[in-house]
Amino acid sequence: MNIALGLATGSDASSASPTPEEEEPQDLGDILDLRPPAKLKISLLPWVIALLIVLSAIGLWFLLKRKRRGKAKKEKPTKPIDPYEEVLQALKEASKKLDVTNPKPFAFFLTDAVRLYLSRIFRLPAPESTTQELLQQLPWCVELTDDLRTNITQFLQRCDLVKFTTMPFDEPFLLQLYQQAEAIVAASHELTKPKPAPVASAAPNVASSSKPEKTSKK
């Protein structure tokens, strides 16, 4: 019996405490691996709002600055355009259109320049009206002289021949139209010049510093 107990006890001991060779190795991977650095959660919303505020302020500053510049330019007094200088420039541009083979553009430029000038200085409806309507208004313009009315009438009628007919026109005829336009402008300019004020003649100085002496009766 002692031998049986010893065997039983030995078998239990061997089964209760296994040998080091029989022990299973432990998995140390989770302990040995390095963990990544923790990420800090930062909200970008406040930075975006601040950036939008700064950009809005810069845009508003540029807008106000541009508005002030535009207002300053508008308030800057501009020199009024002289109708006489403008019509001279228009006649010069019309002279560049003189072409015997195609005289219509020349006639249109020439009449438009004269019509616009007459409408500005004599308040005639020249640009909007036809030639016949304009000629009917000439007698009612008291500033015009009879010679100027006749000259304007001949000029417009001759220009209409060039503009609305297929007749041939030589260079002397077209040059004469240009000279007639210059004459109309020059005469009209003379009529609109301010008249010099008459110089008042100085009254004779008859004042005397001494009074007439009284004659004594004897």
Image: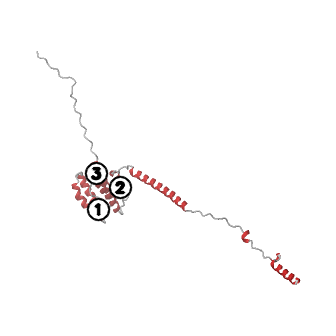
Residues marked 2 and 1 touching at CB (< 8 Å): no
Disc 2 packing (10 Å; few <14; some 14–19; many ≥20): some
Amino acid on which the number 3 mark rests in the picture? Ser
Measured in 3D between alpha carbons, the distance from the residue under mark 3 to the one under mark 1, in whole angstroms, is 21 Å
Q: Earlier in the sequence, mark 3 or mark 1?
A: 1
Q: Is residue 144 left or right of residue 14?
A: left
The quarter of the picture where the C terminus appears is top left
User: Which residue is more in the foreground, 122 or 211?
Assistant: 211
**Location of residue 177 by image quarter:** bottom left
x then y, percent, for residue 60: 47, 56
Measured in 3D between alpha carbons, the distance from the residue under mark 2 to the one under mark 1, in whole angstroms, is 19 Å
Amino acid on which the number 1 mark rests in the picture? Asp
Residue corresponding to mark 3: 188
Q: Is residue 82 visible?
A: yes
Q: Is residue 170 visible?
A: no
Q: Residue furthest top?
A: 218
User: Which residue is more in the foreground, 97 or 31?
Assistant: 31
Amino acid on which the number 2 mark rests in the picture? Ala
Q: Earlier in the sequence, mark 2 or mark 1?
A: 2
x then y, percent, for residue 180: 30, 54
Q: In the rendering, which numbered label is found on residue 160?
A: 1
x then y, percent, for residue 115: 30, 57
**Is residue 6 placed above or below 31 in the rendered structure?**
below
Disc 3 packing (10 Å; few <14; some 14–19; many ≥20): many
Q: In the rendering, which numbered label is found on residue 90?
A: 2
The quarter of the picture where the N terminus appears is bottom right
User: Which residue is more in the foreground, 50 or 37?
Assistant: 37
**Location of residue 120 by image quarter:** bottom left
